[in-house]
Amino acid sequence: MTDVLIVGAGPTGLVLACDLARRGVAVRIVDRSPVPPRTSRAKGPNPRSLEILDDLGVAEEVLAAGSTPPPMLKYRDRAPVEEADPWADLSPSPDALYDRPWLIAQWRLEEILRGRLAGYGVRVEFGREVVGLTQAPDDMGGTDGTDGTDEMNDADGGGRVEVTLAGRSEGQGAGQRAGQGVGAGEGAGARARYVVGCDGAHSSVRKLLGIGFAGTTREDQVMVCGDVDLAEGALDRGVWHQWFDEDGAVMLCPIPGTRTGWWFQAGPERDGRGRPLAPTADGFRRLLARHTGLPGGALVRAELLSTYRVNVRMADRFRAGRVFLAGDAAHVHPVAGGLGMNTGIQDAFNLGWKLGLVLGGHADPALLDTYEEERLPVAARTLDLTSERLRATLEAIRRPGGGLDAAITADTTGLDVGYRWSSLAAAVPQAGGRAGKGVGERVEGRRPLPGDRAPDAPCTDAATGARTRLHHVFAGSRTAVLGFGPGSAAVLREVAEAYGEAGVRTCRVYAVHENRPDGHRGGTEAPAAPCAVIDDGGHAAAAYGTGAPGGPGPAPDPTTGAGTPDRAAAGTDTAPGADAGAGTEATAGAGAAAGAGAGPGTVVVVRPDHHVGLLVPADDARSVREYLRRLHGTGRSAQRFADRFPDTVDAVR
């Protein structure tokens, strides 16, 4: 029996498989396609997805295989009208290394992710389709040769999913982890503790679960798409060409890594009754000649032809027992803004660490409830956002010079997505925030709130002197605990002693003027954490609103009260009269009111998916202890995890 069976080997499924495999989870991934699909449907990752790919250790390869989006050249009646570059004024910032999306053919991105997955000994089983799902109840004896009392079953209740697979998988079983037998032939069975459906808008998993997929399909909003080759030199490959006429449109974007390949999108040809015709190579040639003025023969190849209709749909729920939905299986929306593949990648990154902690025996299975709690509101917001961007784009192209740049806004970077409403976001008075919003609402100079994306920041490795970034500290399969100010040393030592390097990484963030244990500036402080960085530019302190260590905290935030001292809470684990067993919520709220940058310093707990879980004064050790216990159990359970999965691998830097 495998731990997790992933159905669908597109970017969503592959990101999830890579994340689970590096955590030591036994994972199996199947796809109904008989061979790796050679499709270029999505144009590439946005900045938030690039951060995720960086964490998985593949960002450099993705960047090398792709290109920055080119400027957009808009035409009307075959004549160029206007050129626009919606990314021209952007540049990397201290808290976000990636400032723009990156163009890469989807098949090439999948190829890179499959290579990464193969490095963990897992290969995609192509030609396998899920045709049956049956969930066995929890807390019953195992039927896989165990009595249901092994450590992993104890961790998650002992339930399982019986899966029926159709089709054959030729040569894909090599390198699978122990216990991941690969059946062959029709009706082969498989058992998994959890199943994740990443199998697209027509998801077999969703249909087998009977989960509704409510929404609309706009039959009047249709586009034909394909990958084409144009004769060399037919068009300038340094721009994204967009012809918008009153009677139709053609868009041609160069595919990175090819000499003559282009993404082709166009309004369809129509029959005498106005109905869209199916795409064909000859039809593409006629559309090319009509709108661009190029001879139809300039299009020398056309493949992967498809008709796209605007769908706005979302699954009623993202979980049914031990089966989850992610990516297009859970939500589909307009292409405007390029958020389809990216939202799926971010679904996977949210779910992977939670499955890993539950299967590893750290966290209660209730942690998995937070996947739907967090991602369903994000998907709902994405449907609204992309629908609005589509409306803006359709309005823009009515006038000469309008184009796809109308779909590009700060919201499409993915960097503002957060989970302030989540039960995993330690309580902050009046935190507020619309569903799906996070760092994008943070006012410059004020700290992020629990649930927000954790900001990046350039810094220096205190041990080696090498340049690094906070997101490299976060990278891998662990929760990160950052300590700002001398007062954070005690908490960091406690965490390091309890968890070691098994699931939690502690890191002391030093200001340039601070004493350090290496003797710089005459420091005598004993090392507080295995990792230490120097915030030599002050960017980390600015990003997390910690202020000068030992000095005043950040300016009060009028929307939350954060940064305003509370004498009842300052310097104590709980306010007078508070329930001593109330745990994280009571103490975190008090800590937030006390001003995280004031007094002895600040401790920030960053979840494995780079979102802030907790941000409290350094003397609020109890909140840190309770929050980590919720995710990682006690130090003893962390050690059992390390013993069980000694080959847990971090991303290669």
Image (cartoon, rainbow, N blue to C red):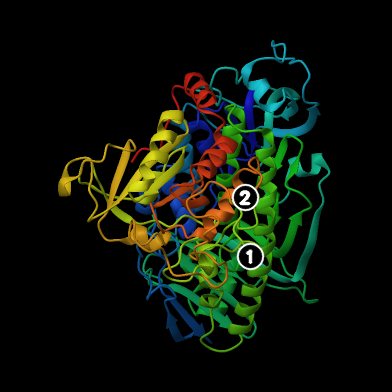
User: 246 or 569, which is in the foreground?
Assistant: 569
Vertical relation: 391 (above or below) 2: below
Q: Which residue is mark 1?
A: 432
Residue lying at 59% horizontally and 73% vertically, measured from the top left: 287
Q: Position of residue 522 (x, y in %)?
A: 15, 46
Q: Position of residue 420 (x, y in %)?
A: 60, 58
Residue 1 visible? The answer is no
Q: Is residue 220 left or right of residue 2?
A: right
Disc ID at residue 481: none
Distance CA(mark 1)–CA(mark 2): 17 Å
Residue lying at 74% horizontally and 59% vertically, measured from the top left: 313
Circle 1 sits in a helix, a strand or a loop, which is it? loop
Name the amino acid, label 2.
Ala
Q: Position of residue 435 (x, y in %)?
A: 65, 62
Disc ID at residue 586: 2
Classify mark 1: residues with Cα within 10 Å, few (<14), some (14-19) or many (20+).
Answer: some
Name the amino acid, label 1.
Gly
Point out the image quarter for the C terminus.
Answer: top left
Circle 2 sits in a helix, a strand or a loop, which is it? helix
Residue 541: image quadrant is bottom left
Q: Is residue 11 left or right of residue 271?
A: left
Vertical relation: 398 (above or below) 407: below
Point out the image quarter for the N terminus.
Answer: top right
Q: Is residue 330 left or right of residue 135?
A: left
